[in-house]
Image: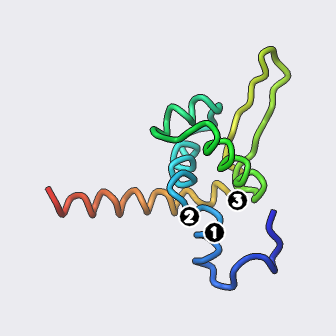
């Protein structure tokens, strides 16, 4: 997890640093719906490679946005979910979806 000193002073820059790439936003969009396994996330984010998905999940886990729960089963079951601070992003993701719909409606 980043320390307070490592984060940008600007809160918008902080948000962009933590979730501001295409893949993280699409992963979060899927986790807003429900906790998911790795393969479900990969299927739900077309075009993402296994490596990139893994790197982005690890980064968001390290930053406290996503949790990773491993169940003691054979084969192992791993589920990703939003943490409490990750849940606070739901209005942001929903606002982005609403704005995207509004923008698209201007071209129909």
Q: Determine the image quadrant of residue 41.
A: top right
In which quadrant of the rendered image does the C terminus lie?
bottom left
In which quadrant of the rendered image does the N terminus lie?
bottom right
**Pointer 1 with pointer 3, Cβ within 8 A:** no
Q: Determine the image quadrant of residue 42.
A: top right
Q: Residues within 10 Å of mark 3 (few under 14, many from 20)?
A: few
Q: Residues within 10 Å of mark 2 (few under 14, many from 20)?
A: few
Q: Is residue 75 above or below residue 15?
A: above
Q: Is residue 86 above or below residue 7?
A: above
Q: Which residue is mark 3?
A: 85
Q: Residue at the spot x=65%, y=64% of the render?
A: 18
**The one of 106 and 85 positioned closer to us in this rendering:** 106
Residue 80, horizontal then vertical, whole percent: 69, 39
Residue 51, horizontal then vertical, whole percent: 64, 40
Instruction: Say what secondary structure mark 2 lies in.
Output: loop
Residue 91, horizontal then vertical, whole percent: 52, 61
Instruction: Say what secondary structure mark 1 lies in.
Output: helix
> Which of the two labelled residues, at mark 2 and mark 3, occupies the earlier sequence position?
2
Q: Which residue is mark 1?
A: 17
* CA separation in Å, label 1 and label 3: 15 Å
Q: Residue furthest left?
A: 108
* CA separation in Å, label 2 and label 1: 6 Å
Disc on res. 20: 2
Label 1 vs label 3, nearer the camera: 1
**Pointer 2 with pointer 1, Cβ within 8 A:** yes
Q: Residue furthest bottom?
A: 9
Instruction: Say what secondary structure mark 3 lies in.
Output: helix
Q: Residue at the spot x=58%, y=77% of the render?
A: 12
Q: Residue at the spot x=51%, y=63% of the render?
A: 92
């Amino acid at each position: 997890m980043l320390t307070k000193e490592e984060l940008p002073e600007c809160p918008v820059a902080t948000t962009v640093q933590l979730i501001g790439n295409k893949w993280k936003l699409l992963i979060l969009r899927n986790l807003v719906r429900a906790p998911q396994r790795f393969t479900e996330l990969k299927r739900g984010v077309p075009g993402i490679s296994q490596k990139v998905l893994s790197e982005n999940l690890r980064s968001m886990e390290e930053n406290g946005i996503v949790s990773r729960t491993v169940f003691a089963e054979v084969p192992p079951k791993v589920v990703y979910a939003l943490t409490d601070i990750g849940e606070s992003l739901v209005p942001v993701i929903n606002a982005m979806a609403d704005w995207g719909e509004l923008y698209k409606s201007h071209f129909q």
